[in-house]
Image: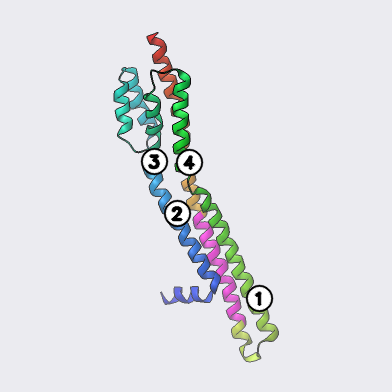
């Protein structure tokens, strides 16, 4: 702990800024991971269950299956199932309206993570420049007895903030990639299975006629 404290202390003010920005990024990552875990579902298995109910003419059973989940895909499909007896354009409108409601919830705050990664890198660069300025000032103006100490302090500040800025940026970028993939999976499944649901309901209504 003493070594970590000394490392942070030697980085100057920008080290603390990087730590604060990093902490905000980690908080957003944890919140997004928790939400996406709730929003996600095994799409193929879920759609197979819905399809079984539809082919058995048990629309209410399919609606009950959707109501038993808090994931985004069931919510979108449920809006279509509730209008299964309506015209195709009304069914499409219901699905589209619900998709437009839920997709922003899936993608919320993802852009902030990219910004935080970039800002961490830039603050690390600022810390580097500050340390180099301090080092040059030590070489040009400091007392010879203190020159080595000030030079070492400036170089330490430059390297430590660079390291911390890159560490924060890399970690946030890696987590962002994972969360983006999970978010994209949820959105793609909503698009794919919404179309399949409309096709199933359209085929069912056609067979009745």
In this rendering, which labeled residue sits more in front, label 4 or label 2? 4
Label 2, label 1: how many angstroms apart (C-alpha)? 34 Å
On the image, the x and y values in percent for residue 150 come to 60, 83
Q: Is residue 142 left or right of residue 20?
A: right
Q: Name the residue under label 4.
A: 104
* Residue 142, quarter of picture: bottom right
Q: Name the residue under label 1.
A: 133
Q: Mark 2 points at which residue?
A: 28
Residue 63 is tagged as none
Decide which of tag 1 and tag 4 comes sooner along the chain. Answer: 4
Mark 1: secondary structure: helix
Residue furthest out toward the right: 140
In this rendering, which labeled residue sits more in front, label 1 or label 4? 4
* Residue 23 is inside the magenta segment: no
Residue 186 in view: no
Residue 1 in view: yes
Q: How crowded is mark 2: few (under 14 residues within 10 Å), some or many (20 or more)?
A: some
* Residue 60, quarter of picture: top left
Determine whether label 4 and label 2 are within 8 Å by CB: no
Residue 39 is tagged as 3
The C terminus is located in which quarter? Answer: top left
On the image, the x and y values in percent for residue 42 come to 37, 35
Label 3, label 2: how many angstroms apart (C-alpha)? 16 Å
Decide which of tag 2 and tag 1 comes sooner along the chain. Answer: 2
On the image, the x and y values in percent for residue 207 come to 39, 10
Q: Which contiguous range is marked in magenta?
A: 151-172
In this rendering, which labeled residue sits more in front, label 3 or label 1? 3
Label 3, label 1: how many angstroms apart (C-alpha)? 49 Å
* Residue 153 is inside the magenta segment: yes
Residue for point 45% across, 22% down = 90
Residue for point 34% across, 38% down = 70
């Amino acid at each position: 702990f003493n070594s970590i404290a000394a490392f942070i202390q030697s980085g100057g003010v920008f080290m603390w800024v990087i730590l604060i920005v990093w902490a905000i990024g980690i908080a957003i990552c944890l919140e997004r991971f928790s939400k996406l875990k709730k929003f996600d579902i095994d799409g193929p298995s879920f759609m197979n269950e819905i399809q079984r109910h539809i082919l058995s003419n048990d629309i209410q059973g399919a609606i009950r299956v959707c109501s038993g989940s808090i994931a985004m895909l069931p919510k979108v499909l449920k809006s279509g199932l509730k209008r299964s007896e309506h015209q195709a354009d009304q069914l499409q409108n219901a699905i589209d309206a619900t998709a437009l409601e839920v997709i922003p919830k899936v993608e919320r705050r993802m852009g902030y993570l990219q910004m935080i990664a970039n800002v961490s890198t830039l603050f690390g660069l600022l810390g580097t420049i500050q340390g180099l300025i301090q080092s040059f000032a030590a070489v040009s103006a400091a007392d010879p007895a203190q020159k080595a100490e000030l030079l070492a302090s400036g170089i330490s500040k430059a390297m430590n903030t660079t390291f911390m800025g890159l560490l924060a940026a890399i970690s946030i970028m890696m987590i962002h990639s994972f969360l983006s993939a999970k978010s994209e999976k949820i959105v793609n499944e909503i698009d794919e299975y919404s179309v399949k649901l409309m096709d199933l309901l359209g085929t069912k209504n056609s067979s009745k006629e």
